[in-house]
Image: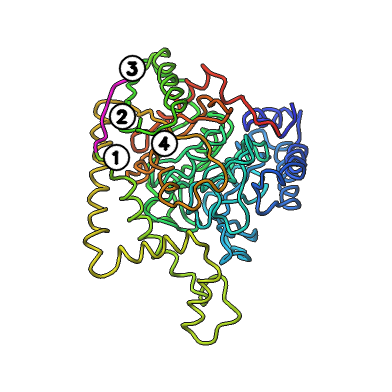
Amino acid sequence: MKPYSLTIHQAAALLRKRELSAQELTRSVLERISALDAQVCAYLTVNVQLALQQAEAADHILSSSPSPPPLCGIPIAVKDVILTQGIRSTAGSRILEDFLPPYDATVVQRLRTAGAVLIGKVNCDEFAMGSSNEYSAFMPTRNPWDRARVPGGSSGGSAAAVSADLALAALGTDTGGSIRLPAAFCGVVGLKPTYGRVSRFGVVAYASSLDQVGPLTKDLEDCALMLQALAVHDPKDSTSVNTPAPDYLAHLAHGVAGLRVGIPKEYFVEGMQPEVEATVQQAITQLTALGAHPIPISLPHTEYAIATYYIIATAEASSNLSRYDGMKYGYRTPSATGLEATYYQSRAEAFGREVKRRILLGTYVLSAGYYDAYYVQAQKARTLIRQDFLDAFSQCDVIATPVAPTTAFRLGEKTEDPLTMYLSDILTIAVNLSGLPALSLPCGFDGQHLPIGLQLIGQPFKEEMLLQTAYAYEQATQWHTHKPSL
């Protein structure tokens, strides 16, 4: 087995036995990136020299410490909306094209503390606004399973890198499904933790009440390892919750015997690709065979989730992105004369089409005369959507649904129809509005051999229950072992 194809826990075992060095592992991944990333386009920046220096330092620790940190010597990619000190962080936008952050995001500090090797920064939709990774200002990332198709967004670069063995794991962010959707489209595991479980300090803000950082990995054990490293209270983030994280690895093998799995009728929607529905139903049958009890439930306000999300998220985006004005932050046009012209032209030249669309929509719903009609109503709907989940969790322990109505669609297929593109997130958005944890794991393929994801939704700060449910399913199946042909 080539070093680049290892999981984190497989590589960590070899590193600790000194049967593989961190430098060999890192070089293997760098050579893989050099050979194949032109086909996938996952990376915006590859840190060759820095990664090799970090790998050398990791080898020193591995040879001298009886208990090296858990991710010591593991090459990990980071989504480009997450700040990395001295390493270009663009957020997928021309307006931050040359930005070198003076500090690390807390999640990056956590990876460094755990001994990880930062192999590079991966592509994303501009400011994490997108469902397909086609709204990056630099290039679209391609799905490793079919390079004519999208990897999903906005963490498409993260998912594609892990799927194609261009990193052993990656960090992504999830505002409306941006970890789970690309994880499903690319056949990897993706976890969105409870809002407040993982620090957002140093993450370029899109919609602050929805954004959350999480891992994308090759299997569930790696996912538990990554969350173990990331889940810690951060005084720098006022939304970080000071709730001790359990030992996620220790919970993995607890199984699903007696677990109540809620099946919401609203998540098997009209127009869903039949293979997706059939495959997810088979996965639920598999969980039942392992000892879980399926329970029909209802989440009656689900139909309002898309509209609610695009009012709240765009309102927050219009506020967060006002700082990029050509004066304080980011790109400044060289051709404007005067203050107002500099504002207008800098933003017009450097923001992409989708970002402008969301800023305009958000500014409109916050404007005088429309605030009460749209924004306030959306906040009320958000409360009802969250209450649906809390009511459901009085009947069940976890909820199982598809991740998306379809498998990965073709590049360009939905870019001219924003509403159709927004519907790609119809089954993931309510989780963000409710601040709940959820994960996607591989559960099969459609007739064109494109991956299908099973979504598991959990109670607040009960990530360990999600992981143990998913792990039981993973151990009983082989979907996570399939690899794209590259």
Instruction: Kindly report the secondary structure that dominates the magenta region of the rendered protein.
Output: strand
Residue 293 numbered tag:
3
Characterize the local packing of mark 1: few (<14), some (14-19) or many (20 or more) Cα atoms within 10 angstroms. Answer: many
| Amino acid type, residue under disc 4 in the picture | Ala
Residues at marks 4 and 3, CA–CA distance in whole angstroms = 19 Å
- Residue 298 counted in the magenta span: yes
Residue 260 numbered tag:
none
SS label for mark 4: strand
Task: From the image, tell me which residue sits under label 4.
Answer: 438
Give the quarter of the figure containing the N terminus. Answer: top right
Which region is colored magenta? Answer: 293-300
| Amino acid type, residue under disc 3 in the picture | His
SS label for mark 2: strand
Sequence-wise, the earlier of marks 2 and 4 is 2
Q: Residue at x 52, y 24 (%)?
A: 444
| Amino acid type, residue under disc 1 in the picture | Thr
Residues at marks 2 and 4, CA–CA distance in whole angstroms = 15 Å
Most foreground residue, 165 or 255: 165
Q: Residue at x 73, y 32 (%)?
A: 3
SS label for mark 1: helix
Quarter assignment of residue 387: top left
Sequence-wise, the earlier of marks 3 and 2 is 2
- Which one is in front in this view, the residue at disc 2 or the one at disc 4? 2
Sequence-wise, the earlier of marks 3 and 1 is 3
Q: Residue at x 48, y 24 (%)?
A: 252
SS label for mark 3: strand
Q: Label 2 near label 1: C-beta < 8 Å? A: yes
- Which one is in front in this view, the residue at disc 3 or the one at disc 2? 2
| Amino acid type, residue under disc 2 in the picture | Pro
Task: From the image, tell me which residue sits under label 2.
Answer: 264
Against 3, residue 479 (above or below) is above
Task: From the image, tell me which residue sits under label 1.
Answer: 302
